[in-house]
Image (cartoon, rainbow, N blue to C red):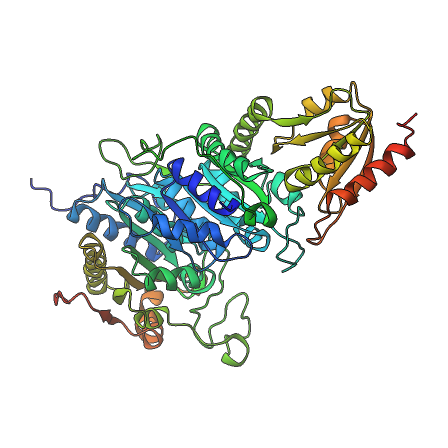
Amino acid sequence: MKKIFSRPRSLKKAVFHYCPGCGHSIIHRITCEVIDELGIQDRAIGVPPPGCSVFAYYYFDVDMVESAHGRGAAVATGIKRAHPESVVFTYQGDGDLAAIGTAETLHAANRGENITAIFINNAVYGMTGGQMAPTTLLGMKTTTSPFGREDKYEGHPIKMSEILAQVNGACYIERTAVNSPANIRKTQKAITRAFRNQIEGLGYSLVEILSPCPTNWKMSPVEAWQWIDDVMSKEFPLGLIKDTTGRGDAH
Amino acid sequence: MTGNAAIAEAAIRAGCRCYFGYPITPQNELTEYMAAHLSRREGCAFIQAESEISAVNMVYGASVAGARAMTSSSSPGISLKQEGISYLAACQLPSVIVNMSRGGPGLGSISASQSDYFQSTRGGGHGDYRTIVLAPASVQELADLTRRAFELADKYLIPVIILGDGMLGQMMEPVEFKHEAPSALPVRAGALRGAKGRHSRFVRTFTSNPAELEEVNWSLFRRYQLIQKQEASCENYLTEDAALVVTAFGIAARIAKGAIKQARALGLRVGMFRPVTLWPFPSEQLKELSKRAKYFLDFEMNMGQMIDDVRLALEGGGDVSFYGRPGGVIPNPTEVLRVITRVYHQKGLNQ
């Protein structure tokens, strides 16, 4: 019998600790598939954040170093500058990349650091129990926006991909989602491009992934997938946001 | 050569190829020297980071990849780096952090001060950790101890702080470099360079298991004990026959030395005990000295920080007076001589 589906080599044989319906496990898997496809398992160095995905090093079978909250882009910069042959990626949530690590992210992009950022946007702080994130939608209730986020008091959801697109050193920015098989395939293609850009030395690449957090959204996994389509992607439109690579192989 | 430039040149000669900094007075000459010598050079990295926080995290990244890496700043910037220093200590990543300290608290002043003694010697950031702290007192010693800092960092897998001050950083003195820069250093064992020909590795600090973290703390503690045993160092200046021993570190010791020379000319039997390592504090050496000297005058450019370690080392065995000038005020030797003379007479040492 021919084997047509198996665990990626870069994914350790471990049981994910993530909640049912969480996007992390899907994104871990497809990132590992990309690492396998590009043959970079022995060059890749991952930088996971504090938060639910802090244990990413239990799953990714590549070298990994934990970063302080928000400092992933600076840590990745240090690794890449000290060891340019490596393929360095950060794995960051919305609180990490769009709040505490805004400066690190923006300036790494502006320097055109040749690194890849995988940016998980689930509109909440997951591990700490569902507090308001910089990307929390208006009207959305969280433990720290119990009356619903209101621009007058809590500001608007911040669109980091659009902000980063203004920065010359960023060569590729795309927003995708993992709420359907089709979107998961698109996400995988985007991650592939983001890694290929680095391998070709083109500069900073970022894939923002709208990812379900059914636990903190207080929804079933199916409702969470639907909510990304119906609500979240209206605020954070999916698609290519910036591409100056000139490769023209956008899907 | 300025003290700041001497540190930079010594670091390069120690094989440091990765420097990340952020402008702050009075240490800018160091960053500028590194910019001139490390940027646009193959195999080197220089970045003027967007903040001190980013700079120290770049050091963390470069160190995890096996490079000799360094950052520098001055007091307010060092406060920002404490997050990163805690992670460097937790991950046991060798690294060198230079603090050319200035007056505080707050934005304080840009003048030389020693008010960061506690911050430097008690870990500085969150968590139960220490860093080695070296306190040079001349430009030559800045250069020598910079090399030593990289060696100690690699030997004990620990961040090492060089605690200077604005005056040492800015002053110019002749300096001799005893080593040529190596072409390339071997990559440190345990570095993350990609899992080529081996299993993948990870470097982390977080664990959800307190027992596991307790073991990490124990293993750090055991290493700290070893460092305390092996690396404490000090300078004894004219202490053999001293009735009064001035305890001072860094630039304050330099000022005190001038005062002691004048005191000796007046026939006062005064000497000086100068810790070169602030952590580990040379407690044994001071305790030993207290067998023949009973009177101590602790002199610092702060309101009394090292004096705690002096008293702990003496275990109540000596008579300790204190003179301090905080806020970036730099006392001259004549002022210190007046204090020495007063204490000398008050304690009846001229009898």
User: In this rendering, is residue B257 above or below B292?
Assistant: below
Residue at screen point 52% across, 34% down = B145
Residue at screen point 20% across, 63% down = A186
Left or right: residue B271 compared with residue B202: right
Residue at screen point 34% across, 53% down = A90
Query: Where does residue B114 sit, x and y in percent of width and height?
Result: 66, 46
Residue at screen point 19% across, 64% down = A182
Query: Which residue lies most toward the left here?
Result: A1
Count of all numbered marks drawn on residues in the image: 0
- Which quadrant holds residue B138? top right
- Which quadrant holds residue B266? top right
User: In this rendering, is residue A112 above or below B83?
Assistant: below
User: In this rendering, is residue B92 above or below A230?
Assistant: above
Q: Nearer the viewer, residue A208 or B180?
A: B180
Q: Quadrant of the C terminus of chain A?
A: bottom left
Q: Quadrant of the N terminus of chain A?
A: top left
Query: Where does residue A215 sit, x and y in percent of width and height?
Result: 43, 59
